[in-house]
Image: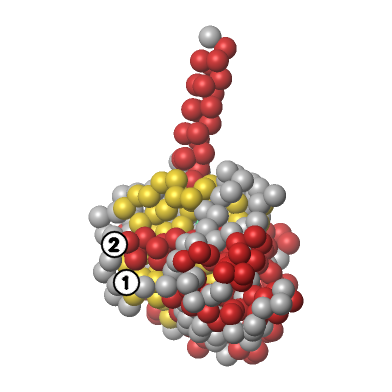
């Protein structure tokens, strides 16, 4: 039987586990120091912890369960990692360089069931949720890469915007947030973390009730139900009225600004009319709303969509600004390396399928 990864435990859970197993409370802090500050990869390296305790941990937990399958580095310093999970599934993680620090984009599910019509991740349906540990390990692996490079760089920001719908894996996402945010560990500030959802309204209420300082982003992509349902079928279950009610609740409860993501698709949702509708939709909450306009990253499987022209992007931006809506155009990272969400993974899966077919052919020959 495979042992669970110790990265899936909050410090409170580890403390309780150690006490239950006859160990001193303070061991948990020591173990966390080894894991998150010194970043050792074997229990045997935790030299200030007695042998009994180390053996106990070793018998019940593993440390790293992910292995690096592919690493692509872009000219702008973006690095895309493809990790293999213990069950053979592949996931993507991206490291991006910004003027304010280093951010990592993490995956929360193997595939995604939301099935947005523009997204590479949605093509391959959800295989399973990631465990909290598997999400934490993505950060640990990227940090390990930085440690090996030896420039003393630290992951300072996190965006939960990789493959999957984080609010469809809420409990494990919360474990992840608690672990990376804890001051005894990586201590990544909540204000430096952003979680993006396609708009699971009922979970937005739950997230608001968690009272965290974590930033919320909502993938909107259209300002009316007809268009939004066409682009994202999740809009059938959570139409704009329901979504905006959840948004109001979140804003009242937290008073924190929400980012609305809007992918610009040529001749689909990039006209002046949609910009005006969007401004109207967000008008009453404009003091707490920011619109992130995202140039579409073409995905081979979705040939019906094209990236909006530069002039259309600019015009959309100007219209929103003119209506008093805070907005910006997202800078792109790693455009030379399968940058769109889920692209590297779907390519690699195709490659492996071709290899398998070839192997089967050879076996038959
Ligand atoms: N499932 C969540 C988080 C992951 S997707 C969500 O949908 O919000 C993260 C972001 O990547 C979303 O805003 C999504 O719209 C965007 N994205 C997906 N495919 C894209 C593409 N081909 N080009 C540009 N952005 C894309
Ligand atoms: Fe899933 Fe987000 Fe992609 Fe939609 S955009 S299919 S919700 S990962």
| Chosen colour scheme | secondary structure
- For residue 175, side relative to residue 192 (left or right): right
Q: Residue at x 41, y 46 (%)?
A: 70
Q: CB of residue at label 2: within 8 Å of ligand 1?
A: no
Percent across and percent down for residue 129 are 65, 56
Q: Determine if the C-beta at disc 1 is less than 8 A from ligand 1.
A: no
Q: Which of the labelled discs sits on residue 129, or is there none?
A: none
Q: Residue furthest top?
A: 365
Q: Secondary structure at mark 1?
A: loop
Between 5 and 19, the one lying in front of the other is 19
Circles 2 and 1: CB atoms closer than 8 Å = yes
Label 2 CA crowd tier, 10 Å (few <14, some 14–19, many 20+)? few
For label 1, the residue is: 153
Q: Position of residue 156 (x, y in %)?
A: 40, 75
Left or right: residue 44 versus residue 203 is: left
The tag on residue 149 is 2
Residue at 52% x, 58% y is 64
Q: Residue at x 64, y 84 (%)?
A: 25
Mark 1, residues whose alpha carbon is within 10 Å: few (<14), some, or many (≥20)? few
Q: Residue at x 65, y 60 (%)?
A: 59
Q: Position of residue 43 (x, y in %)?
A: 53, 65
Q: CA distance from mark 2 to mark 1?
A: 9 Å
Residue 168 found in image quarter: bottom right
Q: Secondary structure at mark 2?
A: helix
Question: Can you see residue 50?
Answer: yes
Q: Is residue 362 above or below residue 242?
A: above
Relative to 255, does residue 77 appear above or below in the rendering? above
The answer to which quarter of the image holds residue 7 is bottom right
Could you say which is closer to the camera, residue 73 or residue 40? 40
Q: Is residue 218 visible?
A: no
């Amino acid at each position: 039987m495979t042992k669970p990864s110790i990265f899936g435990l909050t410090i409170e859970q580890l403390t309780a586990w150690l006490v239950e197993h006859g160990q001193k409370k303070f061991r948990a802090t020591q173990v966390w120091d080894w894991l998150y500050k010194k970043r050792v990869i074997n229990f045997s390296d935790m030299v200030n912890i007695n042998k009994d305790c180390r053996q106990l941990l070793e018998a019940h937990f593993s440390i790293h369960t992910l292995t690096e399958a592919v690493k692509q580095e872009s000219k702008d310093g973006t690095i895309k990692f493809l990790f293999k999970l213990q069950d053979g599934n592949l996931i993507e993680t991206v490291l991006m360089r910004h003027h304010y620090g280093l951010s990592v984009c993490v995956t929360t599910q193997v595939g995604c069931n939301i099935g947005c019509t523009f997204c590479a991740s949605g093509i391959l349906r959800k295989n399973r949720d990631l465990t909290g540990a598997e999400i934490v390990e993505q950060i640990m692996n990227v940090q390990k890469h930085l440690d090996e490079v030896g420039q003393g760089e630290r992951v300072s920001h996190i965006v939960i915007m990789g493959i999957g719908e984080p609010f469809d894996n809420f409990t494990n996402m919360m474990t992840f947030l608690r672990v990376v945010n804890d001051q005894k560990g990586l201590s990544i500030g909540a204000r430096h973390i952003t979680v993006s959802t396609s708009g699971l309204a009922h979970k937005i209420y739950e997230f608001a009730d968690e009272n965290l300082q974590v930033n919320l982003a909502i993938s909107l992509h259209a300002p009316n139900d007809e268009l939004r349902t066409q682009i994202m079928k999740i809009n059938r279950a959570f139409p704009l009225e329901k979504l905006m009610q959840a948004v109001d609740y979140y804003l009242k409860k937290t008073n924190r600004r929400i980012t609305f993501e809007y992918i610009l698709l040529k001749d689909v949702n990039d006209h002046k009319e949609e910009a005006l509708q969007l401004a109207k939709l967000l008008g009453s909450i404009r003091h707490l709303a920011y619109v992130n306009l995202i140039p579409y990253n073409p995905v081979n499987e979705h040939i019906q969509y094209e990236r909006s022209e530069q002039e259309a992007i600019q015009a959309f931006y100007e219209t929103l600004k003119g209506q008093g809506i805070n907005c910006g155009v997202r800078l792109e990272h790693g455009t030379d390396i399968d940058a769109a969400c889920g692209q590297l993974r779907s390519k690699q899966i195709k490659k492996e399928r071709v290899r398998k077919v070839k192997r089967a052919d050879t076996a038959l020959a």
